[in-house]
Amino acid sequence: MEEVNTEDAPPSIGPFSQGIIDDGRLYVSGQGPIDPETGDILDGNIHEQTVRTLENVGSILEAVDSSFDDVVKTTVYVMNMDDYDMINEAYAKYFSEPYPARSAVQIGSLPVDIDVEIEAVARVSEWE
C-alpha cells in the first residue's frame, strides 16, 4: 500500500489518509465541501457543496495522474435525500458514460458539519 497526500485537498481530520493506492486502485477517503487552502467549510447550497467536494476528490485523483474517467465506484453520503437531484446535477458535470457504480446513503451526521461527503475508487497507472 502507498499513501496519497496532496495539499490541493483538505488534510485528513483523523487517523486516515486522503487516499491509498493498492493493487492498481486508488481508494479516496470521503471528501467534503472544505476549502483546502483555508480549511473552511463551504457555506453554500448543496449544489455548490457537491462541486467543492468533487473538486477535492479530483485533486486527489490528479495527484496520482488519474481522473474522473478512471473512477469505477463512488459512495455519496448525504444528510438529506431531498437534495439528491441537486447533487446529481453537480455530479453529472464530473462523470461521463459509462458512469461509475455508485451508492447514495442518507446519514444522520458526519464528523464535521457538512451536507455531503463523497468517496471514490479509481484505476491508476503505475505511480511513484
Image (cartoon, rainbow, N blue to C red):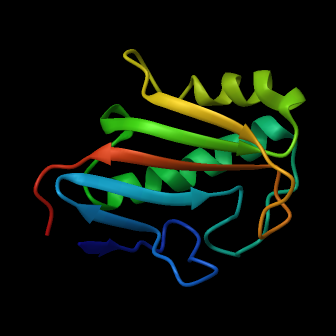
Residue at image coords 69%, 22%: 89
Rendering coords of residue 95 (x, y %): 47, 27
Q: Residue furthest left?
A: 126
State the residue in front, 42 or 73: 73
Indicate whether 22 appears above or below 75: below
Residue at image coords 14%, 70%: 128
Q: On the image, which quarter does residue 15 sit in?
A: bottom right
Q: On the image, which quarter does residue 83 sit in?
A: top right
Residue at image coords 84%, 46%: 79
Rendering coords of residue 90 (x, y %): 66, 29
* Quarter in which the N terminus is drawn: bottom left
Q: In this view, does 56 lie to the left or right of 87?
A: left
Indicate whether 14 appears above or below 50: below
Rendering coords of residue 69 (x, y %): 34, 32
Residue at image coords 80%, 48%: 107
- Count of number-bearing discs: 0
Q: In this view, does 121 lie to the left or right of 7?
A: left
